[in-house]
Image: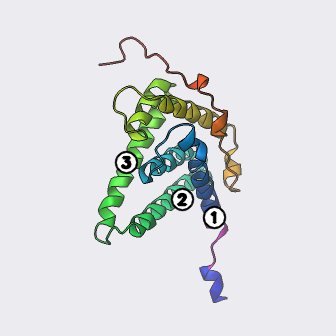
């Protein structure tokens, strides 16, 4: 039947469901109300980037089929960005340049977050979040420390989920409201870390 050609396959449906879960988590009101993430187009972009980066990092070590879901989610993210730019009135000729810039921003942030998480450096993570999410170049605000604590908790939470579950579109993030401000107090940097 010709119409079967146009149906979404199970893989596409899985990727759509995973990306939908990521976007829903990134839009949770707690981040904007309790963590003080700016409730702006930029703030919402940063929260989606943060969650896509967490998922990307989690599936990186999985077997090919599950690892490919990370690329699929990233592709959905790019399509979503393209659509959003066009809805905001960015012209057809300007979209590719903006997309390249946004793609570079994603990879820069993902590497920065991954490096801090892998090194267990919550202070460096808070610093990266302060610059990227809160646009605060100085000392990280309290929200950046709390968001860093959330990312550490989310990384652990994702690590506890089996990779095969992602292939069934089962993805779960922790409740941000369970991250207390006490758990996110600034971590002192080791002597000699600052240049």
Establish if 111 lies above or below 84: above
Q: Which of 32 and 79 lies nearest the eye of the viewer? A: 32
Residue at 65 percent of width and 82 percent of height: 4
Residue at 67 percent of width and 67 percent of height: 10
Residue at 37 percent of width and 54 percent of height: 102
First reached walking from the N terminus: tag 2 or tag 1: 1
Say whether residue 118 is left or right of residue 1.
left
Spot the residue most to the top: 191
First reached walking from the N terminus: tag 3 or tag 2: 2
Establish if 33 lies above or below 188: below
Q: Which residue is mark 2?
A: 72
Marking on residue 186: none
**What span is in magenta?**
7-12
Q: Mark 2: which secondary structure?
A: helix
Q: Tell me the distance, in whole angstroms, between the alpha carbons under discs 1 and 3.
A: 27 Å
Q: Which of 111 and 180 lies nearest the eye of the viewer? A: 180
Q: Tell me the distance, in whole angstroms, between the alpha carbons under discs 3 and 2.
A: 18 Å
Q: Which of 45 and 9 lies nearest the eye of the viewer? A: 45
Tell me residue 151's x, y (percent). 56, 35
Tell me residue 168's x, y (percent). 71, 56
Tell me residue 173's x, y (percent). 65, 43
Question: In front: mark 1 or mark 3?
Answer: 3
Q: Which residue is mark 3?
A: 105
Say whether residue 120 is left or right of residue 135.
right
Magenta-colored stretch includes residue 195: no
Marking on residue 11: 1
């Amino acid at each position: 039947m010709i119409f079967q050609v146009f149906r979404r396959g199970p893989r596409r449906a899985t990727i759509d469901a995973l990306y939908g879960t990521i976007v829903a988590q990134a839009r949770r009101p707690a981040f904007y109300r309790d963590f003080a993430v700016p409730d702006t187009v930029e703030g919402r972009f940063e929260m989606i980037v943060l969650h896509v980066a967490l998922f990307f990092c989690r599936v990186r070590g999985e077997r090919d089929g599950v690892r490919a879901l990370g690329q699929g989610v990233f592709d959905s993210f790019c399509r979503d960005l393209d659509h959003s730019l066009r809805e905001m009135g960015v012209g057809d000729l300007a979209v590719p340049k903006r997309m390249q810039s946004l793609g570079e921003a994603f990879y820069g942030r993902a590497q920065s977050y991954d490096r801090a998480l892998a090194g267990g450096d919550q202070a460096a993570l808070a610093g990266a979040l302060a610059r990227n999410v809160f646009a605060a170049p100085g000392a990280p605000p309290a929200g950046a420390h709390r968001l860093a604590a959330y990312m550490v908790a989310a990384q652990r939470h994702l690590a506890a989920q089996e990779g095969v579950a992602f292939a069934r579109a089962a993805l779960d993030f922790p409740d941000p409201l369970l991250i207390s401000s006490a758990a996110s107090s600034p971590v002192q940097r080791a002597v000699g870390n600052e240049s």
